[in-house]
Structures are given as structure tokens and as C-alpha cells.
Image (spheres, grey):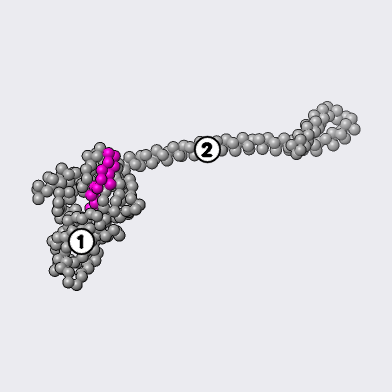
């Protein structure tokens, strides 16, 4: 109903405009002049309405163009963000390769760079998943490290990924040595984010802050990899050994880029020792 009223009003205004324009040629007649005077307000009103309609149409068109441009810009931003994500990952892969080269220069091990792609939600302190598998030459029991120190050992392998058992897990034991006192022992995880060094003789002069490194026991882990630092020392009455609590050097909550020590390099390293 409102639309019909507006339509009729526009027709009436246009009709008055036509009358006013025709009356411009007959200004000599007084009654015509009076009629013209009456029509002038409608004429001016028609101009105002016409300009308003032109403005509305122009503004609507401008908004439509702006919305289309915004939509195109959003699509372009999304495309650029995807490209940036891919480039960022490529840069990280390049950084991994450069870091691997730097580690190989610092230690006599041949390493394979790898990324953490998952954690076990039911065994957060015990296991993680990496993006290298049998297709990359990975086999069980290879040692896994970061630039900070020991992470764990490869537990199970699959064509394109593997699982790593962390040193925080009670299911893994690593031969260790206190670097300052030269006491030997075995390091196991306590399942709560720390490690415990067992079989340290009661007479040991171990102190808080002492560095613990791998002893090279066995064929899978070379000697000299940092495990962590002594956090606490516990002694049980009547026991021959101390229980040394170790804070691992690696930040296991932020593990991302790891390195797997190749077995061939380990064999060469053990032969030298």
C-alpha cells in the first residue's frame, strides 16, 4: 500500500513539473501566473525528491561496489595468509636443515631432522609422534635429541611416522654419569615431568645443580648427551644408594624440532671410545 502511494505521489509531482514548464511560456495571463505560483512549491518539492532518489540510488550503488570490493579483499587476504603459512613452514624446514648441520659440526653424530606431529593424550609425559618413519631409514631404539639435550628413543616405526618414548617415562632407562663426581647410575622418568637417577652410591658427593649426561651404556645412546641437572637428593636410612631427582634440560612442553642420531654414526662413535 505504501509503495502504491509513493508511486502515485511521484506521478503527481511529475505532472506538476510538466504544467510548470508549460506555463513558463504564458506568463502574461494572471490566472495562469497564479496557477504557476501554486505549482512552484510542488515543482521544487519534486526536485528535492528527485535529488533524494538520485542520492539513494547512487549511495546504494556505491555501497554495493564497496561490499564487492571488501569481499574480493577478504578472499585475497585469505589466499595470502595461506601462502604465508606455507612459506613459514618452508622456512622452518630450512632452519631445521641448517640447525642439523650446526649440530653435526658440534657433535660427532650424523643426525636426521624431524618434527613433532602429535602427543599421546593418555601418556603426555611418555610418548610423542614424529614425521619420520621407515621410509626415511628410521628404526627402533635410535636416540632422539634436541639442541638442549636428550629427549628419548624411537619406540615404534611406521612407513611415514614413528613414536618416541620420552626419558620422562618410567618405561625407559638410560645409562648416566654425574659429570662432576663421575658417579654412574641409571636415569628413569617418574611419569610426572622429572627424572630419577638410581644406583648412585651413598658416599657420592653429588650436589644440587650438578650436570647429568649419558654414559654411553648400550649401543643406542652415545656418551656425553646432556640429560639434565640435579634438582634434589633423597636418602633412605639403611639404603646403599641415593635417589637423585633430575630436572631435564629439554622443555618437553614446547618440543617441536627434534633430531634422530643415526645408528651408523653411533657405531663409529662407540668404536672410537
Q: Which mark is residue 197?
A: 1
Question: Where is residue 94 drawn, in percent x and y?
Answer: 29, 41
Depth check, front residue: 163 or 68: 163
Q: Would you say 246 lies left or right of 14 here? A: left
How much space separates mark 1 and mark 2, taking CA atoms?
Answer: 61 Å
Q: Secondary structure at mark 1?
A: strand
Residue sitting at x 56%, y 38% = 67
Q: Magenta span has 87? A: no
Q: Which residues are magenta?
A: 144-163
Which label number is shown at residue 12? Answer: none
The quarter of the rendered structure image containing the N terminus is: top right
Report helix, strand or loop for mark 2.
helix
For this rendering, which residue is in front, 157 or 80?
A: 157
Residue 237 x %, y %: 19, 72
The magenta stretch spans residue 162: yes
**Residue drawn at x 29%, y 45% as measured from the top left:** 130
> In front: 269, or 2?
269
Residue 94 visible to an observer of this rendering: no
Task: Please give the residue where the numbered disc 2 appears in the rendered image.
Answer: 71
Q: Is residue 243 visible?
A: yes
Q: Residue at x 22, y 39 (%)?
A: 137
Crowd around label 1: few <14 · some 14–19 · many ≥20 (10 Å) = many
Amino acid at each position: 500500500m505504501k509503495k502504491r502511494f509513493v508511486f502515485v505521489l511521484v506521478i503527481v509531482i511529475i505532472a506538476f513539473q510538466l504544467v510548470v514548464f508549460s506555463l513558463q511560456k504564458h506568463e502574461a495571463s494572471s490566472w495562469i501566473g497564479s496557477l504557476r505560483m501554486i505549482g512552484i512549491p510542488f515543482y521544487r518539492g519534486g526536485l528535492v525528491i528527485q535529488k533524494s532518489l538520485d542520492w539513494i540510488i547512487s549511495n546504494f550503488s556505491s555501497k554495493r561496489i564497496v561490499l564487492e570490493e571488501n569481499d574480493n579483499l577478504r578472499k585475497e587476504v585469505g589466499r595470502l595468509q595461506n601462502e604465508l603459512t606455507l612459506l613459514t613452514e618452508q622456512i622452518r624446514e630450512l632452519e631445521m636443515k641448517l640447525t642439523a648441520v650446526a649440530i653435526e659440526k658440534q657433535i660427532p653424530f650424523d643426525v636426521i631432522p624431524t618434527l613433532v606431529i602429535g602427543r599421546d593424550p593418555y601418556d603426555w609425559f611418555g610418548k610423542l609422534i614424529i614425521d619420520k618413519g621407515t621410509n626415511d631409514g628410521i628404526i627402533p631404539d635410535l636416540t632422539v635429541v634436541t639442541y638442549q639435550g636428550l629427549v628419548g628413543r624411537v619406540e615404534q616405526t611406521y612407513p611415514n611416522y614413528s613414536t618416541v618414548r620420552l626419558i620422562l617415562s618410567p618405561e625407559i632407562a638410560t645409562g648416566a654419569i654425574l659429570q662432576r663426581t663421575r658417579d654412574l647410575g641409571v636415569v628413569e622418568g617418574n611419569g610426572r615431568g622429572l627424572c630419577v637417577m638410581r644406583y648412585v652410591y651413598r658416599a657420592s658427593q653429588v650436589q644440587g645443580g650438578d650436570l647429568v649426561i649419558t654414559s654411553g651404556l648400550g649401543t643406542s645412546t652415545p656418551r656425553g648427551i646432556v640429560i639434565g641437572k640435579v634438582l634434589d637428593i633423597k636418602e633412605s636410612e639403611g639404603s646403599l644408594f641415593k635417589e637423585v631427582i633430575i630436572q631435564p634440560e629439554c622443555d618437553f612442553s614446547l618440543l617441536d624440532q627434534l633430531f634422530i642420531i643415526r645408528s651408523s654414526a653411533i657405531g663409529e662413535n662407540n668404536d672410537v671410545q
